[in-house]
């Protein structure tokens, strides 16, 4: 799976299920989801489930940190690194 496909899936989930919009302009890929108030700990767990179900991978508890889940860019990077390992 390409980073473009991963980005589209993650962005779509965040916009539709956490921000309740399909307006792509409301979410910059480098915007902090925590600073925007888009996700909290429950939102991170929801994103982990989306990642595990869609990208056939397991997310360790130790990986559930803002460095991996605070923006679309960081999530895509985390998934790509994890899939390459």
Image: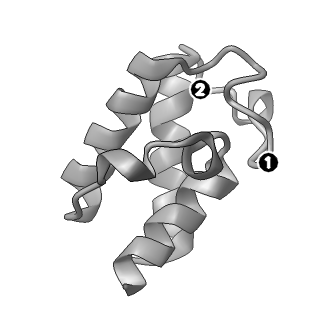
What residue do we see at 45% from left, 35% from top?
13
What residue do we see at 76% from left, 34% from top?
32
- Given residues 6 and 36, the one toward you in this image is 36
What residue do we see at 43% from left, 52% from top?
63
Tell me the tag on residue 30: 1
Q: Is residue 65 above or below residue 79?
A: above
The disc, 1 or 2, on the residue closer to the chain's N-terminal end is: 2
Q: Position of residue 82 (x, y in %)?
A: 40, 73
- From the image, state whether disc 1 or disc 2 is nearer to you: 1
- Describe the element under mark 2 as helix, strand or loop: loop
- Given residues 25 and 81, the one toward you in this image is 81
Q: Position of residue 67 (x, y in %)?
A: 64, 50
Label 1 – label 2 distance at C-alpha = 18 Å
Where, quadrant-wise, is the N terminus in this rendering? bottom left
What residue do we see at 59% from left, 26% from top?
22
Q: Disc 2 marks which residue? A: 22
- Given residues 3 and 25, the one toward you in this image is 3
- Mark 2: few/some/many CA within 10 Å (<14, 14-19, 20+): some
Q: Is residue 1 above or below residue 76?
A: below
Q: Position of residue 23 (x, y in %)?
A: 69, 27
Can you name the residue that lies furthest to the front here? 62
Q: Hey, which quadrant is residue 66 in on the image?
A: top right
- Mark 1: few/some/many CA within 10 Å (<14, 14-19, 20+): few
Q: What colour scheme was applied to this rendering of the protein?
A: one colour
């Amino acid at each position: 799976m390409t980073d473009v496909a991963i980005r589209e899936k993650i962005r779509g989930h965040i916009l539709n299920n956490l921000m309740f919009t399909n307006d792509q302009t409301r979410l910059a890929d480098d915007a902090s989801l925590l600073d925007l108030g888009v996700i909290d700990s429950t939102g991170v767990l929801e994103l982990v489930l989306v990642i595990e179900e869609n990208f056939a991978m397991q997310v360790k508890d130790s990986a559930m940190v803002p460095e991996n889940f605070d923006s679309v860019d960081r999530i895509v990077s985390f998934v790509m690194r994890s899939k390459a390992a």
